[in-house]
Image (cartoon, grey):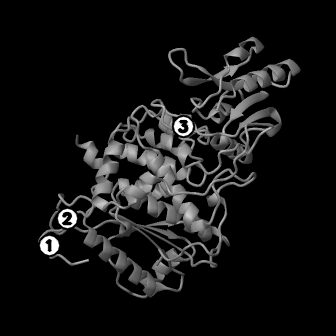
Amino acid sequence: MNYTKQIQDIAAKLFAEGKIDVFVGYRLNGFDDNHVPVLITDPQDVSKLVFTDKSVFNLVNYLKTDHTRRKRVGLVVKGCDSRSLNLMLTENQVKRENLYVVGICCEGVVDDAGQKMQNCAECVVPDAVVSDELLGTPSGQKPYTVNVDIAALAAKPLTERTAYFEEVFENCIRCNACRHSCPLCYCAKCCIDQETATLYNGANTTSAAFHALMTWSLHLAGRCVDCRNCEKACPSHLPLHLLHKQNESVIYENFQEHLAGVIPEDRGAFYKYSLKDPDDFIM
Amino acid sequence: METEVKDQLVSIEKPELVAPPNWEPVIMGILCNWCSYAGSDLTGTSRIQYPPNIRIIRVPCSSRVDPWFLIKSLQTTADGVLVSGCHPGDCHYISGNYFARRRFLVTKKLLNFVGFHENRIQFSWVSAAEGPKFAKVVNKVTEDIKKLGPLHLYKKENFDKK
């Protein structure tokens, strides 16, 4: 998977036609062959752009910043990124007419060790669902599988799960990088921060981390697209996908919903209901 | 499961921690204004006894209950939470409890996944005419949580002392 040449050509063409003010893509980080996001405003810098299977980050996150707000933006999206873009469009955070979207038919990206990432191995929608221009050959939707980590943990007894997650929450340093790296966490004022104003909950304790991460994951339930930007950004390497995938699997199995962001104008599982929803857990 | 006779009550999530003598659970009851709160009122005016462990909070509708409320309750004082609303189809706001029902299931499963016993988070539908049912529900929830022992997970005050 190498679309470097095509993306450079597209960006140069868009700048020449005056269609965009800024192009969001990837460049080499300057130390090794890993990629970092780059915002290009000068047409001469177009040659910096690259795209290979090392382009792991979700660029939709950069539509939240002042560099791209109220500007015409060119953007590269993979399958999962395009789903989050779909949700951003549905929730009126960005305007479609201001965007030029280069969709990729993704074959999976790799982590630092060169292994295919877990979410790519389990990917259901590898092709971009929103695009003005599609690169690669579409391979269609794949069947949904429950995350292997979720299945392994759910089979364990309660006390083991308790101990496991206590360690997870204990290692959180409350830097909020997960929140900043998430394209769907765009609230100007977060409800978790209002808690931190009370002196105590701002403290870096296991209790505060539990409160923050659980609230965060439940506010993203039915919207998370499993791009794993949060996990890539986490300095403590917490398995944040566990919380999101758990919610996703419950929603997928119980409500017969399709995955978040696949269908345009669909706001996610919590914005609708069915009379046939499971009721057996309620007295 | 086999019933094991224990001398001391232990926390089910952390079996090494023993409950203090005469321990009583604190249960957060979040009730919808139109059905369950009126139902609990009827229980009282009908002179039906129910355990005093429940602390009731009134909300406009069960869909007002953000999952955050449950997390916050479990993190501060509560050993368990009971959320109660109108029966499906009876919602004062027409469809509020249908939306709430989806959220409740996901919240319950997630809290269970990270290590809370599933009986710590309970839900019920109680209408304004079901005074006896409300007493029965509170009895059952209190009994369930008494069996589980005190909740020691992620409590604020445990970290306050350090």
Quarter of the figure that contains the C terminus of chain B:
top left
Q: Relative to residue A195, is residue A263 depicted above or below?
A: below
Q: Secondary structure at mark 3?
A: helix
Cα distance in 3D space between marks 1 and 2: 9 Å
Distance of label 3 from label 2 (alpha carbons)? 40 Å
Please tell me which residue is depicted at 15% across the width and 67% down the height of the picture: B21
Question: Which residue bears the numbered disc 1?
Answer: B6
Label 1: element kind: loop
**Residue sitting nearer the eye, A40 or A180:** A40
Q: Is residue A238 above or below residue B71?
A: above
Asked if the residue under mark 2 is in contact with the one under mark 3, i.e. CB atoms within 8 Å, the reply is no
Q: Residue furthest left?
A: B7
Residue A161, quarter of the rendered image = bottom left
Percent across and percent down for residue A84 are 65, 43
Res. A12 visible in picture: yes
**Cβ–Cβ below 8 Å for labels 1 and 2?**
yes
Amino acid type of the residue that numbered disc 3 sits on in the rendered structure: Asn
**Up/down of A132 relative to A45, above or below:** below
Q: In this rendering, which labeled residue sits more in front, label 3 or label 2?
A: 3
Question: Which residue lies under the disc numbered 2?
Answer: B10
- The label on residue A229 is 3
Whether label 3 touches label 1, CB < 8 Å: no
The single residue placed furthest to the right in the displayed view is A17
Dot 3: within a 10 Å radius of its alpha carbon, few (fewer than 14), some, or many (20 or more) residues?
many
Query: In percent of the image, x 35 and y 58: which residue is there?
Result: B115
From the top left corner, tell me how far across and down residue A58 is, in percent. 61, 35
Q: Position of residue A24 (x, y in %)?
A: 69, 26
Looking at the rendered structure, whether the residues under marks 3 and 1 are on a common chain is answered as: no
